[in-house]
Image (tube, rainbow, N blue to C red):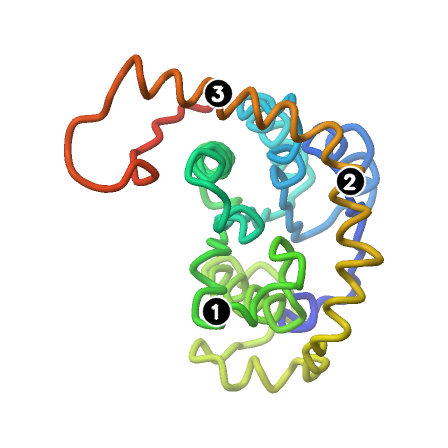
């Protein structure tokens, strides 16, 4: 995105595994010190993979971060979470709980963005990556692949078109994408089957073991609560159980 916009400088203060509260406590002070003209902010994915997940906490921390960045004159790009490919093939009760968490985070993102007005834009990650199919995602099925990152950058640049005029030197971009694609280096070749298996053995399985100690007990509780709620308040209508709407209020 920095390349597409012709940014003079780019700093990445993100950290692996950071939660929304880590963004506020650790990353935000550094970001504010840089006095950015544009900030990209993606939170909630790591929160959704924890036992103590709270959509209200994500919304609160996100609101603090966006407000502080606006105060120093930054336009903020927020991103929604797509359904996690890691859980889309899980049993229906698990898939339903994880979809509900994603929906709750996305409701918080849109709520905060609406309150920020023209100072914030929302990038719908699922929509931006959909045309690429599985090629948009890393082998972990959670993070974007290099090709996916490029698709997200193009979508973000298009979403920012109305806000680009205040940026000195901002490039006039071809909204159809041909010129923008030409500005970016070609992505590396996708990993081979052997490389994917090696990643799963050396990184994926150890990560799942470490995270599972915290995540799985909370997920089990959430699934049980969801099943009990379904018994107590059965749905009336058509469609599969995992198509039930989830109504979330973030404040």
Vertically, is 74 above or below 137? above
Residue assigned mark 2: 209
Give the residue at x 78% y 45%: 207
Q: Position of residue 57 (x, y in %)?
A: 60, 22
Give the structural element (helix, strand or loop) at label 1. helix
Q: Position of residue 79 (x, y in %)?
A: 54, 49
Residue 236 visible in the current orientation: yes
Residue 112 visible in the current orientation: no
The image quadrant of residue 232 is: top left
Choose mark 1 or mark 2, whichever is in front. Answer: 2
Choose mark 3 or mark 1, whichever is in front. Answer: 3
Q: CA distance from mark 3 to mark 1?
A: 32 Å
Mark 3 or 1 closer to N-term?
1
Front position in the image: 5 or 16: 16
Residue positioned most to the left: 237
Mark 3 or 2 closer to N-term?
2
Residue assigned mark 3: 224
Q: CA distance from mark 1 to mark 2?
A: 28 Å
Give the residue at x 77% y 50%: 205
Mark 1 or 2 closer to N-term?
1
Residue assigned mark 1: 133
Vertically, is 179 above or below 4? below
As drawn, is 118 to the left or to the right of 193? left
Give the structural element (helix, strand or loop) at label 3. helix
Give the structural element (helix, strand or loop) at label 2. helix
The image quadrant of residue 45 is: top right
Front position in the image: 181 or 142: 142
Tag 1 near tag 2, CB within 8 Å: no
The image quadrant of residue 213 is: top right
Give the residue at x 53% y 63%: 165
């Amino acid at each position: 995105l920095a390349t597409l916009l012709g940014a003079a400088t780019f700093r990445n203060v993100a950290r692996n595994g950071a939660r929304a509260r880590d963004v506020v406590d650790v990353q935000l002070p550094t970001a504010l010190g840089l006095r950015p003209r544009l900030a990209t902010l993606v939170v909630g994915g790591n929160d959704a993979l924890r036992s103590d997940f709270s959509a209200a906490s994500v919304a609160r921390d996100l609101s603090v971060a966006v407000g502080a960045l606006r105060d120093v004159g930054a336009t903020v790009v927020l991103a929604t979470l797509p359904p996690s490919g890691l859980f889309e093939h899980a049993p229906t009760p698990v898939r339903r709980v994880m979809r509900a968490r994603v929906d709750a985070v996305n409701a918080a993102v849109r709520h905060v963005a609406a309150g920020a007005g023209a100072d914030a834009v929302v990038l719908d990650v699922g929509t931006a990556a959909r045309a690429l199919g599985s090629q948009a995602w890393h082998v972990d099925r959670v993070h974007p692949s290099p090709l996916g990152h490029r698709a997200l950058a193009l979508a973000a640049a298009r979403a920012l078109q109305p806000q680009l005029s205040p940026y000195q030197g901002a490039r006039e971009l071809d909204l159809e994408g041909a010129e923008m694609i030409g500005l970016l280096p070609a992505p590396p070749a996708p990993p081979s089957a052997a490389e994917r298996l090696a990643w799963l053995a050396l990184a994926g399985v150890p990560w799942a073991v470490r995270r599972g100690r915290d995540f799985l007990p909370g997920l089990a509780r959430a699934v049980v609560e969801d099943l009990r709620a379904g018994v107590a308040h059965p749905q009336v209508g058509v469609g599969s159980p995992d198509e039930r709407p989830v109504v979330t209020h973030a404040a």
